[in-house]
Image (tube, helix red, strand yellow):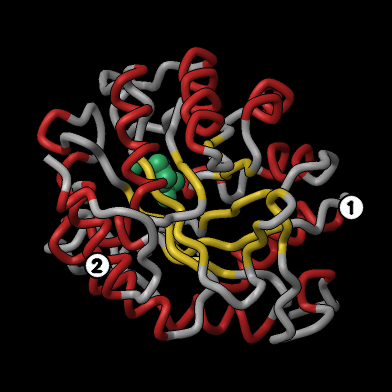
């Protein structure tokens, strides 16, 4: 790389990013972030949050501003979605992460979210990155499906260069010739990102695979590779999801994954009526 980057100041020495007191990403214990692709209804996000909490995952996700491939697909509930997400987070004690698509919406999203997500399609939206560099909230930066590792790290640098160094990287699959899976989970680059920077790195196998049956194995692989966590789409009723239902785990799937990862806590949804 041409000149030293802030994000590569201490290669391989991961600095934890504090989400709220008691919860950091990159502190040694892998963090599981789970929840639906989109916030849909009060009941849906509440049920999802309770399932996430029950399984022992530490953070709730849910999109309110959705970057959909088609303009005719469900675009999210907007501010109402943010409100419902924050309420579900409060109800369950889980911090929440949600996407921000527009620099002008940062203040709004930051009022509700503990962690602000930059979606894959916006990884090189430099106005958005620069503006996020000036806020006092952590940022989850997804890798663009066509972005090289170097481009991804430079995108993180746009945020860091403005002063906000609370950045978590998220590998969510890149575009390859394979079409059976939605994208290809590039775990090698995710591990390289951890070796080259001091930023925590997580993986999102849901968007990478696009098929729920592949998600638990890839999530376990990400943790085995030493990543700092995973983000998983979970829906109380995937068949009726308004977005990304094919890749959503059920609450029982999530519990099985947590058990397989040795992260299970609390009572089992599988045992309840
Ligand atoms: C998401 O997390 O809901 C999402 C849209 O992901 P990506 O930006 O990785 O496609
Ligand atoms: Mn999704």
Going by the picture, which residue comes out furthest to the top? Answer: 80
Residue 73 sits in which quadrant? top left
Residue 268 locus on image (x, y percent): 25, 54
Classify the position of the C terminus by image quarter: top left
Residue 152 sits in which quadrant? bottom right
Going by the picture, which residue comes out furthest to the right? Answer: 163
Residue 214 locus on image (x, y percent): 18, 66
Q: Which residue is mark 2?
A: 216
Q: Which residue shows up at 44% across the image and 32% down it?
A: 63
- Label 2 element class: helix
Category of crowding for the residue at label 2, using alpha-carbon neighbours closer than 10 angstroms: few (below 14), some (14–19), many (at least 20) = many
On screen, residue 239 versus residue 248, left or right, reads left
Category of crowding for the residue at label 1, using alpha-carbon neighbours closer than 10 angstroms: few (below 14), some (14–19), many (at least 20) = some
Q: Which residue shows up at 54% across the image and 18% down it?
A: 83
Q: Which residue is mark 1?
A: 163
Per the rendering, the mark at residue 227 is none
- Label 1 element class: loop
Q: Is residue 70 above or below residue 196?
A: above
Marks 2,1: beta carbons within 8 A: no
Residue 242 sits in which quadrant? top left
The quarter of the picture showing ligand 1: top left
Asked if the beta carbon under badge 1 is closer than 8 A to the nearest atom of ligand 1, the reply is no
Q: Earlier in the sequence, mark 2 or mark 1?
A: 1
Foreground tag (2 vs 1): 2
Asked if the beta carbon under badge 2 is closer than 8 A to the nearest atom of ligand 2, the reply is no
Observer able to see residue 210: yes
């Amino acid at each position: 790389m041409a000149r030293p980057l802030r994000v590569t100041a201490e290669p391989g020495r991961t600095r934890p990013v504090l989400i709220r007191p008691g919860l950091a990403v990159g502190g040694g214990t892998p963090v599981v972030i789970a929840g639906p692709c989109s916030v849909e209804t009060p009941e849906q996000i509440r049920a999802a949050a309770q399932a996430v909490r029950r399984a022992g995952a530490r953070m709730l996700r849910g999109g309110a501003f959705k970057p959909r491939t088609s303009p005719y697909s469900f675009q999210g509930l907007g501010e109402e979605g943010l409100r419902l997400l924050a309420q579900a987070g409060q109800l369950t004690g889980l911090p929440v992460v949600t996407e921000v698509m527009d620099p002008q919406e940062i203040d709004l999203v930051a009022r509700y979210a503990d962690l602000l997500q930059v979606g894959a399609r916006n990884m090189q939206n430099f106005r958005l990155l620069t503006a996020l560099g000036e806020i006092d909230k952590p940022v989850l930066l997804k890798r663009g499906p066509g972005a090289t590792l170097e481009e991804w790290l430079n995108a993180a640098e746009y945020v860091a260069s403005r002063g906000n160094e609370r950045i978590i990287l998220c590998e969510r699959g890149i575009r390859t010739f394979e079409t059976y899976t939605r994208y290809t989970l590039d775990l090698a680059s995710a591990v390289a990102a951890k070796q080259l920077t001091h930023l925590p790195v997580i993986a999102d196998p849901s968007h990478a695979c696009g098929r729920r049956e592949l998600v638990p194995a890839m999530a376990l692989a990400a943790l085995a590779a030493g990543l700092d966590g995973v983000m998983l789409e979970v829906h109380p009723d995937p068949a009726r999801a308004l977005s990304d239902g094919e890749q959503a785990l059920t609450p029982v799937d999530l519990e099985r994954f947590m058990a397989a990862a040795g992260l299970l806590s609390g009572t089992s949804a599988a045992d309840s009526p």
